[in-house]
Image: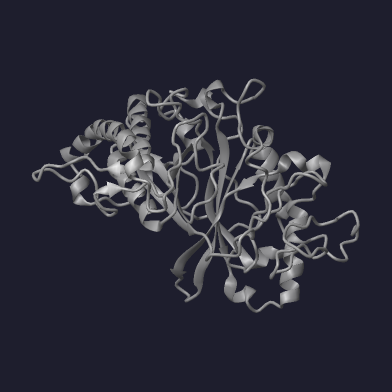
Amino acid sequence: MTTDSPDAPASSASSEALGSCPFPHARLGRRAFLRGTALGAAGTAALAVGTGALAYAADAADASSGASGRRIPFYGPHQSGVLTPQQAEASFVSFAVTAADAGGLRELFQTLTARIAFLTAGGPAPATDLASPPTDSDTLGPVIPSDGLTVTVGVGASLFDSRYGLAAQKPKHLVKMPVFPNDDMQDSTERDGDISIQICADSRDTVMHALRDITRHTRTWMEPIWKIDGFHAAPRPAGTTQRNQLGFMDGIANPDVTDPAAMNALTWAGGANSVEPTWAAGGSYQVIRIIRMLIEFWDRVSLREQETMIGRRRDSGAPLDGTSESDLPDYPADPMGLIIPLTAHIRLANPRSTATYDQQILRRGYNYDRGIDLDGNLDVGLAFCCYQQDVSRQFLAVQNRLNGEPLVDYISPTGGGYFYVLPGVRGPGDHFASGLL
């Protein structure tokens, strides 16, 4: 569902967004070619292939500008894909880690680092002799485009169980995502995970190629358990916000990602005065929610009722007391909710008071389409994703205000999870989770 994350009454804008597990025993089926020594050999070779490819890609990057002409830097104190302007396509994938010990976990993160650094840089795939399996699927051709690709890696609470000796290093607010009163996920198989990977790019083929490459090179240590694919709406007028499957603009306002002070206060966790473990500095809490929209019912509701449930005009995105998308609703001038109802989604999600300023979230959601369910209904909705410094102070506070809102009759959250996005990789000698391990 769309949420208005709180912001200061009259200044900075905020985000609006639609609102330990035994994973090794819940694995996807594997085909015969993964059995036996081939699996181990592929895993052992993965890091060497990735490292060599990375060195080559650094030289070839200028020749591979990407299908969209965009290359997004991989190295830095924070991972890309958080503040990065949203690409057109995305996949959110959760994995169960199957590494036998902490050494295997380290190899997993080293391999992830090498593969993602190569894929985001782009360049020719390493050559293959005819007697060996190809080093790349070639679904994008012999030269891999960067295509605005970002791959963002997070860890779930279950990774900090007894398997790898990491319990004392768990981020302070990292827990399994609770089931909220209006959720439909008690028996869901699409919940939480040891590792989350968010893959975004300017084309669907690039997202799929990256996921195929990552799963191929990491099968020794982890297996995918659930996935949701997302897309942005069709091209829209410049300066306007994408629409969700309910027809309303979704994510009209977010914190200013160009303001370092705002990001340090709202998005990035860790630091000198933080309660987080030292290794976590520069990370962020990620919330993923698979929110199905019951559009067959929604499409039978009058426009007036739709708008009063949301609190905005459907055509322009303006609040009901305004004229344009960028207008801030004036709640003090409407204390009884005669214009924007007190139960309206934007009013509950974002009271726009000084007291709720630090509850802003940085949302980064995508529409999804999963086809048709067993009853012949369209299975569409929102792959909601948001980032914040403290999931309890921010997302949880917003979600608790939204429990029981009128919109709950038309949405059905079915899965998702809480994850901690790792600090960035500082340079070629570093790797994901180096501080943790």
Query: Is 278 on the left or on the right of 21, as rendered?
Result: right
Q: Residue furthest front?
A: 62
Residue 69 percent across, percent down from the top left: 41, 50
Query: Is 379 on the left or on the right of 293, as rendered?
Result: left
Residue under the point 67% across and 43% down = 256
- In the image, residue 91 sits, relative to residue 316, either above or below, namely above
Q: Quadrant of residue 292?
A: bottom right
Q: Tell me how many marks there are.
A: 0
Q: Quadrant of residue 60?
A: top left
Would you say residue 122 is visible in this rendering? no
- In the image, residue 329 sits, relative to residue 245, either above or below, namely above
Residue 370 percent across, percent down from the top left: 45, 65
Residue under the point 72% across and 42% down = 359
Q: Quadrant of the C terminus?
A: top left
Q: Quadrant of the N terminus?
A: bottom right
Residue under the point 54% across and 42% down = 82
Front-lying residue, 2 or 177: 2
Q: Residue furthest left?
A: 131
Residue 276 percent across, percent down from the top left: 60, 26
Front-lying residue, 136 or 346: 136
Front-lying residue, 98 or 5: 5
Color scheme of the displayed model: one colour
Query: Is 176 on the left or on the right of 272, as rendered?
Result: left
Would you say residue 3 is visible in this rendering? yes
Residue 257 percent across, percent down from the top left: 63, 41
